[in-house]
Amino acid sequence: MPLHCDPESLALLALGEPADSPADEAHLAGCVACQSELDQLKAVIHASRTITGGDRPVTPAPAVWGRIEAELGLAGTTSADHGTVVPLRRRRPVGAALLAAAAAVTGIAVGAGVMATLQDGRDTGTVVARTALDPLPQHSASGTAVLSTAADRRDLTVEVAGLTAPSDTFYEVWLLAPDASRLMSLGLLQPGQATTFELPADLDLAEYPVVDVSLEPMDGDPAHSSDSVVRGTLSA
């Protein structure tokens, strides 16, 4: 039996289809890493189905493009060459099935990972829960996470002050179970900026009340690095 579920099976499950192999479904029941990746894929599908004309991508900081150029060996190019494309964390390939499905649903190509977008001209909603994000050992940053509701959506806005990412690293926002036995990624956090994530409609925050920001290496591994910078638990 493979160490982890086949990416194509995870893509099918995220779309609501049966997995290619019953063994994958059995493995998924006991594998935190595969369940986390499935949660992320479901969030992609949900985000792709709720995109509106008011959504726009976040323009990356010049330093982000600098790291991408360095990793890919694109010496001599500048961030101006790339327009306003949003770089997403490179993850384990999920196959053509998910990409084709996302494109069919939204009319645009959606990469693997959860897209955090800034919404222009829409109601900021009513605050229903918040938490201070306190530093973990060996870190000194701090911030806030605010949960708001409006119409048929829930938004989590995360802002952390004092973040300084070393070269070849980035910050990622997660929701964790109280005992940290289960987790799901919401997406990337730009240092010094408040970022708003639209939560999946079927997400039970009672099961994932802990907001965690981690420092991640650019190694293509979708798993949590175990290097948490700040953390807090949402409460009304």
Image: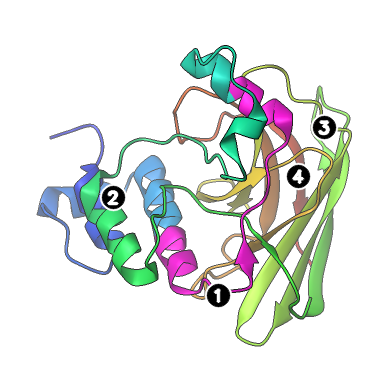
* Tag 4 secondary structure: strand
Q: Is residue 57 above or below residue 78?
A: below
Dot label at residue 231: 4
Q: Is residue 47 visible?
A: yes
- Residue annotated with mark 1: 52
Depth check, mark 4 against mark 3: the one in front is 3
Depth check, mark 4 against mark 1: the one in front is 1
For badge 3, the amino acid type reads Leu
Between 127 and 45, the residue placed more toward the observer is 45
Give the CA separation, mark 2 to mark 3. Answer: 34 Å
For badge 4, the amino acid type reads Arg
Q: Earlier in the sequence, mark 2 or mark 3?
A: 2
Q: Which residues are magenta?
A: 42-67
Q: Residue at x 44, y 28 (%)?
A: 220
Q: Residue at x 82, y 32 (%)?
A: 163
Q: Residues within 10 Å of mark 2 (few under 14, many from 20)?
A: some
